[in-house]
Image (tube, rainbow, N blue to C red):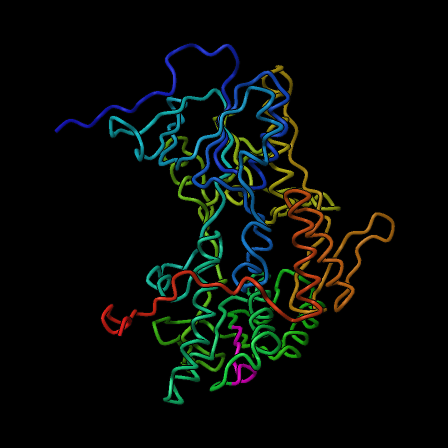
Amino acid sequence: MSTPSPATSSSAVPSKPRVVIIGCGFGGIEAVRVLSKAAVEITLIDRTNHHLFQPLLYQVATAGLSAPAISGPIRHILRGEMRRGNLTILLGEVSRIDAGAKSVLLEDRGMADGGPERIDYDYLIVAAGATHSYFGNDGWADHAPGLKTLADAFNIRRRVLLAFERAEREAEMARRNAYLTFAVVGAGPTGVEMAGMLAEIAQHTLPEEFRRIDSRRTRVVLVEGGSRVLSAFSDKLSQKALEQLRSLGVEVLTNAKVSTIDADGLSYEALDGSTRRLDAQTVVWAAGVAASPLGASLAATTGCVLDRAGRVVVNADLSVNDHPEVFVVGDLAAATSPDRTGTPQPVPGVSPAAKQMGRTAANNLLARLRGEPTKPFRYADYGSLATIGRRAAVAAVDMPVLGPVQFSGGLAWLFWLFVHIYFLIGFRNRMVVLTDWAWAYFSFERQARVVADPDVAPRPTAERSA
């Protein structure tokens, strides 16, 4: 049986340079906005139809915000760029990059001939992002979902809310306690934010909504393999975060390396070498990320080097070695940038860095078209923020006049709140989020607590109609 040949996007010679951008995250969006003003033909490919403001994804997972508040249709967000007439948006998943042929292959879903679609390019920007890493224990994913997409957030929200519902029906005390125990693995920003919000739900949102259980007796356990929480922050802010977590009722286990995760909880190795067990019906994974598989595809076809996380080691201008027409940005790029002393430092996988990379790659691409030299990427680090709960957060910010400033508590929380609202996708989203947060702040209510598929077996039809 012969394999169908890939369908090509166009046989005509284009009048303008063809630019393909893979991924509509922060880096991809910024690249499109720069390039749409130039004399190029852009094809933007993403496997979803929406752009996601990922820093607030945990709010959807904990029923604090609805999905439209932190996401929007790609075609709507880029409607201004679409009016310029040089942007095509395709819903599809890139399965392979063929740098030799200067083309990308899309999954064959939807193609009439059953073969993959081929999109040719003159220049390529890969902004495919990252996924979860379970450090070789991929079987844990079924029991400890990570948080990268809206589907992940819906899954976690469903598990969290149904845990309380099942605890209400459970008569056996040990099983009830397991339903009321939530474990979060990994004490980076995502893990700290998740743990803090879970504690807030249990302590402030759900009391008096159940008759058989007291949600305030819920255990939220944050499990960290390292010696402290928020290890990317200073020791001072890490300690402040620990204190705020504990004040919210979160149990923090440091130097606790997870060894197994199953349907009934997890086991971890303590600092003294002993193995201990934590029975928890709900486990959330926030311990590791891995680069998109497209990094390996690039390595296979370009010979580029990957780091241990599967990220592409890029040149100073974000291009791929020996392939100046290919740029990699965002979480998929292992890039460095000089600090104040001129020492190269790894660029963190945060949204401001992805935005800056997207703009730099697009401008360097245009420089190549003009026959001009490209410029090295310089990351402008404005600081780091992490929220823990109501009036609890930590911030390390580089102020224009004051220089580096560290603060925590209510002031850091307000600063975090307005920074995130400011960087949301559009005006409507900002207003929705501000309104929802104001309501939640004064009422302690979370209105997004709807589960569409509760997985409760219906009674037989005859019994229901009796």
Is 80 situated left or right of 464 in this image? right
Residue at 29% x, 24% y: name it: 6
Q: Is 14 included in the stretch rendered in magenta?
A: no
Q: Position of residue 83 (x, y in %)?
A: 60, 23
Residue at 46% x, 58% y: name it: 154
Residue at 45% x, 63% y: name it: 451
**Which image quadrant is residue 266 in?**
bottom left
Instruction: Depth check: give the residue in front, 251 or 335.
Output: 251
Q: Position of residue 349 (x, y in %)?
A: 58, 49
In the picture as drawn, the residue positioned furthest to the left comes out as 1
- Compared to residue 124, the image places residue 344 above or below, namely below
Q: Which residues are magenta?
A: 214-222
Can residue 140 be seen in this snapshot? yes
Instruction: Depth check: give the residue in front, 419 or 432.
Output: 432
Can residue 308 be seen in this snapshot? no
Quadrant in which the N terminus is drawn: top left
**Which image quadrant is residue 236 in?**
bottom right
Instruction: Depth check: give the residue in front, 451 or 225.
Output: 451
Q: Is 216 included in the stretch rendered in magenta?
A: yes
In the picture as drawn, the residue positioned furthest to the front comes out as 466
State the count of labels. Answer: 0
Quadrant in which the C terminus is drawn: bottom left
- Compared to residue 159, the image places residue 81 above or below, namely above
